[in-house]
Image (cartoon, rainbow, N blue to C red):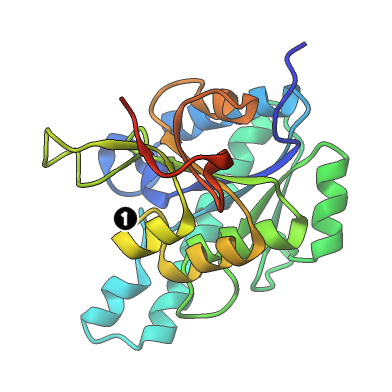
Amino acid sequence: MDKAKYKRLILKLSGEALAGSKGYGIDPEVVYSIAVQIKEVVEIGAQISIVVGGGNIWRGVAGSTKGMDRATADYMGMLATVINSLALQDALSKHDVDTRVQTAIEMREVAEPYIRRRAIRHLEKGRVVIFAAGTGNPYFSTDTTAALRAAEIEAEIILMAKQVDGVYDSDPMKNSNAKKFSTLSYIDVLNMGLGVMDSTATSLCMDNRIPLLVFNLNDRGNIRRAVMGENVGTYVGGDNNGKSSTFRS
């Protein structure tokens, strides 16, 4: 049986990823596909936890720019991530994948409260753990949640599932001459403003030496390929595996 390169990891999904081509809400077929891919990772022995955004339902920043209190808008966004997490848990359960949702804001009727040692124990037992409701604090993104939880559970890597196949020097959707990076350092990401993660999350990863792998979620099987260590995107790390920042040839 194939062996995973990364034993314990965090998969970061945007809320928009669950919406698919609809752009809003939750597309059951997309969630089903993601659940199948996650099951493949569990079957090769990797311990996987997930952080899901809520942008397909509500964005706190968008609400605050239209006059809403920022903290209130952010709390609404945290609740949106819980909705997405429950949808993903349901899909995983239908594929016989034992899954727990842990929330940073207590709502015991629908999920466990986030407890670090309990989360680690779930992972050790082969369960998938979905971290919902962000950090439980306004003004922090789900990117920061992924970086924080990765540090807490001692994850070996964060897999950043995107709609593009890596990190480019400019928007490949707008610039046909955009060049793709094969490797980057955290400092590169910060200095060039590449938007892999927000600056708080990137700094947290840098301080705790947690590498990132940015890859295309739309290519079926890429989650498993990423966990196996295959070359499917852009690697971001403190030393770039001993290399300087490079473009893909």
**Pointer 1 residue:** 194
Up the image or down, 246 lies above or below 63; here it is above
In the displayed structure, does residue 189 sit left or right of residue 32? Answer: left
In the displayed structure, does residue 242 sit left or right of residue 77? Answer: right
In the displayed structure, does residue 118 sit left or right of residue 25? Answer: right
Residue at the location (57% across, 53% down)? 51
Residue at the location (29% across, 76% down)? 63
SS at circle 1: loop
Q: Nearer the viewer, residue 201 or 193?
A: 193
Name the spot of residue 49 as percent of width and height, x first.
Answer: 67, 46
What kind of residue is marked 1?
Leu
**Viewer can see residue 231:** yes
In the displayed structure, does residue 111 sit left or right of residue 249? Answer: right
Residue at the location (36% across, 42% down)? 19
Q: Residues within 10 Å of mark 1 (few under 14, many from 20)?
A: some
Up the image or down, 97 lies above or below 99; here it is above
Name the spot of residue 85 as percent of width and height, x first.
Answer: 57, 51
Q: Nearer the viewer, residue 10 or 98?
A: 10
